[in-house]
Image: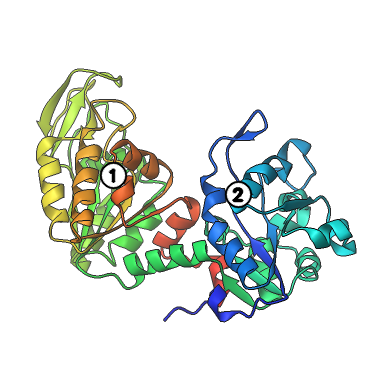
Amino acid sequence: MMAWKTLDDMDLNGKRVLCRVDINVPVENGHVTDATRIERIVPTVEYILEQGGTPILIAHFGRPKGKVVLDLSLRVVVTALSEALGRKVRLIETLEAAEAGTDEIAGADVLLLENIRFYPGEEKNDAALAQRLAGLGDIYCNDAFSAAHRAHASTEALARLLPACAGRLMQTELQALESALSAPERPVGAVVGGAKVSTKIDLLQNLVQKLDILVIGGGMANTFLAAMGADMGASLREDDLLDTARAILDEAKTRGCRVILPVDGRVAREFAAGAAFDLIALNGDTKLDADQMVLDAGDAAVVEIVTAFETLKTLIWNGPLGAFEIAPFDTATVAAAQAAAKLTRDGALVTVAGGGDTVAALNQAGAADDFTYISTAGGAFLEWMEGKELPGVAALS
């Protein structure tokens, strides 16, 4: 049972709804170049309007660090926002203006407060700022899962001052993540890739306690192979984390989580697109030359990984299996992603993916559209996977 409320639990008629959104979109020469984040908040704003409420959007843009930085004004997104919503959106430049209210403000369909990070109190989770924001509305709706791992005034303190709920995007994201990790259909597995173990220690330690199968790829796999005794040559690895890697493997064994490391790899002598490579078996006895480096999982590794996918009901994906940004070292990531996508299409697997490189890697593989859910939330997705409480979610319950 989910502890947080949704828009369906709220009476919105005649209410001012303070809605925290993430519209931190890429902009070039004053124009929004990718409106994905804006498009994803449309269902929430439309629902509030349909129910007779007035949406007052609260958002950040860039990192102004508590000062007014005109280059980081939300004015730049107003046109794209109006187009996506098919409604008149008015930017309110100061909290004073919002508090005073004008006929213009009263006449707009959707209100957008200026960049909330212009206020030093935002990132300090300042109670006085939250109190001022609360004075502008009757209901609080958080639709910015991507900012939910930060305890800021507009995500945490404010949520505790008004009747609070999750917006549609937040609701979708939380339901997807709960189905993948909190109460998944088993067997459940994960792919965790990327360059460094150091950035994913908490993630790995949490996952081995919850998963049936854990596939480790990318540069991280080299550290685990080195921990098992392999000489990994010039491969990217973290020698100061060998004990940590061994401890994670021991914990996995205790918990009955099968860890899959690449049984072979594409091994090159230079990190470059189109570099010549050999397929070399990888295990605790591997001894690579000093100038050899593993840049991708090999063909046998892919077969083992895909065979494992076929035994699963739920798969979580975070990070690539190799140096996917340069061919041919994207081969394993593309092949494994396409296999997971096909199993999802066939209704055999629920796939949830997230984290920076992951979305790019799945798009490159042409697999993203077939995954059950792709989170664009980055840090919040990872912290959820690490088993940490997210302040912005906790404040809704």
Residue sitting nearer the eye, 155 or 41? 41
Residue 34 place in picture, x, y as percent = 53, 39
Residue 108 located left or right of residue 241: right
Residue 307 located left or right of residue 89: left
* Quadrant of the drawing holding the N terminus: bottom left
* Quadrant of the drawing holding the C terminus: bottom right
Question: Considering only vertical position in the picture, is 290 above or below 54?
Answer: above
| Mark sitting earlier along the chain (2/1) | 2
Residue 383 located left or right of residue 221: right
Q: Quadrant of residue 58?
A: bottom right
Residue 272 place in picture, x, y as percent = 30, 19
Residue 190 place in picture, x, y as percent = 27, 56
Residue 198 located left or right of residue 4: left
Q: Residue at 73% across / 43% down in the picture?
A: 75
| Disc 2: which residue | 23
Amino acid type at circle 1 is Ala
Amino acid type at circle 2 is Ile
| Disc 1: which residue | 367
Crowding at dot 2, Cα within 10 Å, few <14 / some 14-19 / many 20+, comes out as many
Residue sitting nearer the eye, 220 or 25? 25
Q: Residue at 33% across / 48% down in the picture?
A: 369
